[in-house]
Amino acid sequence: MAADADVALAAKRIAWGKFLNAGQTCIAPDHVLVDASVEAEFTDALVDAIGTFYGTDPQASPDYARIVNAGHLRRIEKYIGDGEVVTGGQVDADDLYVAPTVLRSVDPDSAVMNDEIFGPVLPIVAVNGVGDAIARVNANDKPLALYVFTRSRPTADRVLSSTSSGGACVNHVVYHVAAPQLPFGGVGPSGMGAYHGRAGFEVFSHRRSVLTKPTWVDPPVAYPPFTSLKKKIIKRFL
């Protein structure tokens, strides 16, 4: 997230996309790279957005999901210890509940920063500008989705042209998967190929190549032995 982004709107949209289905979507944001100058403002806005969506007790909210099974709950719970908890952190194994959790001061080598979280734990990482954010993205595997928040079209273009990802959104998250006219898929470690709409028809279809040649003409120049005259003719048409 660039320093010129609409911080409150970015926080609301990121909170929505991250904690949708308790973070159990393949295109949920795994972490937020935020300009250091707006880190505190963004963190506060993110906490406010979570409270607006799910109340003071998200476990009681009818709009907040549960973890799919106990094994994944134990896996996700370990990530909470990889940073300082800003909000959340509560776990109820009997209810398969992990609170919407925000972390800061996270070690870049920790598991939460290198695994696909697939759960409701969101690390915030302060960066020194857009260039630093781009460098961090490019230092890791190519993501399935990349999201950039900025009021500047040139800044958005710079991020998109300097990184590689399966898909991307500018000033929102997740929504690109809902556009049937856009192909959806990964690149490199995040996958290969794409589907949805026409792209889906093409990826799941085989284009069989068929060539039909007439029989009424069969020039001898195509067959050996290749005399000097044949070679001259062939070279003339190549």
Image (spheres, helix red, strand yellow):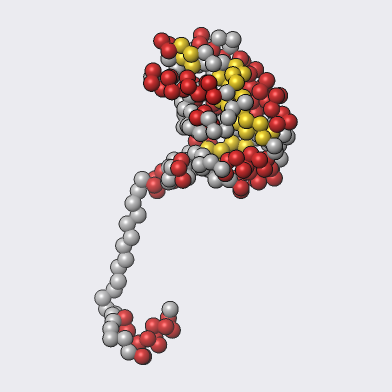
- The spot of residue 101 in percent (x, y) is 55, 19
Residue 105, visible in the rendered structure? yes
Classify 164 as above or below 83.
Answer: below
Front one among 107 and 2: 107
Q: Residue at x 43, y 19 (%)?
A: 73
Q: Is residue 179 visible?
A: no
Q: The N terminus appears in which quarter of the rendering?
A: top right
Percent from the top left, x then y, of residue 44? 68, 20
- In the figure, 111 relative to 97: above or below? below
**Which residue does the image show at 35% across and 87% down from the upper left?**
230
Q: Position of residue 46 (x, y in %)?
A: 63, 22
Name the one closer to the observer, 40 or 227. Answer: 40
The total number of labels drawn is 0
> Residue 208: percent from the left, percent from the top?
32, 57
Quarter of image, res 201: top left
Task: Looking at this view, name the residue that lies furthest to the left.
Answer: 215
Q: From this view, report whether residue 202 is shown above or below residue 108.
A: below
Q: Is residue 217 above or below residue 104?
A: below
Quadrant of the image for the C terminus? bottom left
Q: Quadrant of residue 126?
A: top right
Residue at the location (59% across, 36% down)? 147
